[in-house]
Each structure stands twice: as C-alpha cells, then as structure tokens.
C-alpha cells in the first residue's frame, strides 16, 4: 500500500488491521489470539478521535499521564461504561489517589514509594487494580523502571509486606537496540518470579512481542496516527 492510502485510512480500519496482525503473530507462535490483549494508547488524542474506536468495540485504552486521562475519560466513560483504562506512563506519588480512582490497571510500578502508595489507596478506596512492575531492561539512566537486579526486592516488598498481587512485568526497550532481546529477557524475569503477565510491544514491534509471549501490547500511533 502506498503511504498516501495508509494515511487516508482511519483509526477504525487500522485497529482492525492491528487485531488481525496480533492474531497471526499469536497463531504463528502457537498461542491463542485471545491471550493477547490490545491496549489502544490514546495519549494526546481527544474524544473526537477516540470515540470512533470506542464505537468500533475497542474497550481497553492506555494513557501515560494521570492529568490528561482525568480530563477526558470520565466523560467518555459515561457513554462507554465498560472501558478498561491502563496507566502506562510514570506515576508521581502525589497523583496516586487520582490514579487509583481513575485507572483499572497500572503498568509503571518501579519503586517502593509508588508500590506503598498504590497499596494504601487501593485499601482506602476498596479498589483492586491490575498491577505491573516496570523493568528498565536496558538499564538506561534516563528511563523509568526498576533495574533487573533490584526486581526481586521490589516484588518481595509488594507481595510479602504490602499484600499486592503483581500480575506481570512491563518494559520499553531502548530505541536503538533489538527489541526481541529485551522481550525475551522480560519473559525470563517474569517466569523466574512466577508471573504470567507481560506488557510489552508498541506500534513498531508488537508482533515480535507477541512471539515472545506478550499478554498486553500497547499500540498508539499505528492506530491513531502520529502524535505532534
Ligand atoms: C506512547 C506509549 C506507547 C505507544 O507507543 P506507539 O509507538 O505510539 O505505539 C506504548 N507504551 C508506552 C509506555 C507509551 O508511553
């Protein structure tokens, strides 16, 4: 397809293509397509762009900022009550209360303070979120995520002291490295620590992530188009 034709396609057509590509990648890996959950990453897009995707039946969405999500999702949820909202960006401790109120899943637990805050707020609010620990698999200085060597201690805190169920691990591979290496590493860490969930794979590499066991792929621009 020419780039011009690709641009003319709307998010609903692209959503269907991504779903089909996920299904093919799953089947090629001997996995069930239903075992891979597509999170449509709607950050920077507003209700007019998100609504058609909701109307097409997509219910799982990802946002990377609490404030931005709080500005648009409560209204969208009045129309689509069964939306499942995933926080995929870094969480600041002063936003924990709001994050636990708004989101159904948090993918970015990466330090004790955040884990404690989430545990406290879930207890206070009587809410139970799906939780992922973000791992800085590339050990990049500027990137969020717990270092691999510090993962066991953080998981022990979450589980033994805070009584949290951690559903899986999340990573964002370094841009200049082969993502497969990071996906394989994250899968190994999850298996070693008895977790089934793997949040990995974005627009450019979700098929590879599915081959390496992703249970949640976070796809933004391939559905909604480029972000300014
Ligand atoms: C923005 C974002 C994505 C989606 O990225 P695309 O390349 O647009 O698919 C996935 N994960 C995280 C954590 C993000 O911030």
Image: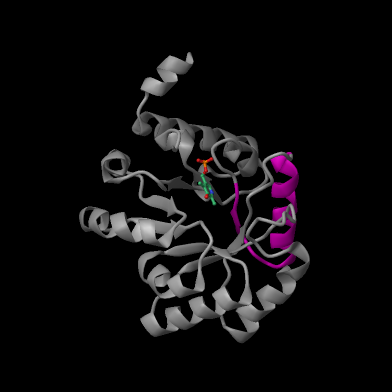
Using the image as rendered, state which of residue 49 and residue 20 is in the foreground: 49
Check the image and report above or below for 79 versus 212.
Answer: below
Using the image as rendered, state which of residue 11 and residue 130 is in the foreground: 11
Task: For residue 164, say whether it is visible.
Answer: no
Check the image and report above or below for 100 versus 183.
Answer: below
Check the image and report above or below for 78 versus 97.
Answer: above
**Residue 94's spot in the image, x, y percent?**
46, 74
**Residue 100's spot in the image, x, y percent?**
41, 71
In the image, residue 197 lies in the stretch drawn in magenta:
yes
Q: Residue at point 60% right, 62% down? A: 168
Using the image as rendered, state which of residue 167 and residue 143 is in the foreground: 143
Using the image as rendered, state which of residue 210 and residue 123 is in the foreground: 123
Task: For residue 224, say whether it is visible.
Answer: yes
Magenta span:
178-200
**Which quadrant of the rendered structure holds the C terminus?**
top left
Instruction: State the image quarter where residue 71 is shown.
Output: bottom left
The count of marks equals: 0
Indicate the colouring scheme: one colour
Q: In this rendering, would 37 be left or right of 74?
A: right
Check the image and report above or below for 209 versus 77.
Answer: above
Q: In this rendering, would 151 be left or right of 41?
A: right
Main secondary structure of the magenta stretch: helix
In the image, residue 159 lies in the stretch drawn in magenta:
no
Residue farthest top in this picture: 2
Q: Residue at point 63% right, 34% down? A: 28
Q: Residue at point 51% right, 79% down? A: 117
Residue farthest right in this picture: 149
**Residue 35's spot in the image, x, y percent?**
53, 49
Q: In this rendering, would 71 be left or right of 202?
A: left
Q: Residue at point 26% right, 41% down? A: 48
**Residue 44's spot in the image, x, y percent?**
39, 45
């Amino acid at each position: 397809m020419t780039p011009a034709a690709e641009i003319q396609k709307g998010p609903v057509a692209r959503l269907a293509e991504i779903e089909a590509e996920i299904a093919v990648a799953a089947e090629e890996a001997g996995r069930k397509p239903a075992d891979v959950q597509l999170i449509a990453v709607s950050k920077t897009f507003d209700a007019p762009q998100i609504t058609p995707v909701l109307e097409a039946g997509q219910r799982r969405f990802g946002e990377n900022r609490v404030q931005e999500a709080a500005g648009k999702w409560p209204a969208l949820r009045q129309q689509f009550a069964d939306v499942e909202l995933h926080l995929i960006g870094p969480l600041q401790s002063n936003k924990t209360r709001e994050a636990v109120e708004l989101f159904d899943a948090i993918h970015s637990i990466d330090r004790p303070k955040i884990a404690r805050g989430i545990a406290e707020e879930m207890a206070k609010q009587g809410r139970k979120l799906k939780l992922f620990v973000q791992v800085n698999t590339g050990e990049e200085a500027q990137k969020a995520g717990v270092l691999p060597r510090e993962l066991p201690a953080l998981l022990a805190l979450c589980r033994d002291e805070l009584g949290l169920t951690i559903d899986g691990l999340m990573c964002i591979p370094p841009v200049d490295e082969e993502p497969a290496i990071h996906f394989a590493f994250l899968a190994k860490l999850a298996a070693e620590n008895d977790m089934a969930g793997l949040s990995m794979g974005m627009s450019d590499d979700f098929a590879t992530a599915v081959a390496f066991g992703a249970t949640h792929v976070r796809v933004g621009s391939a559905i909604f188009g480029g972000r300014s």
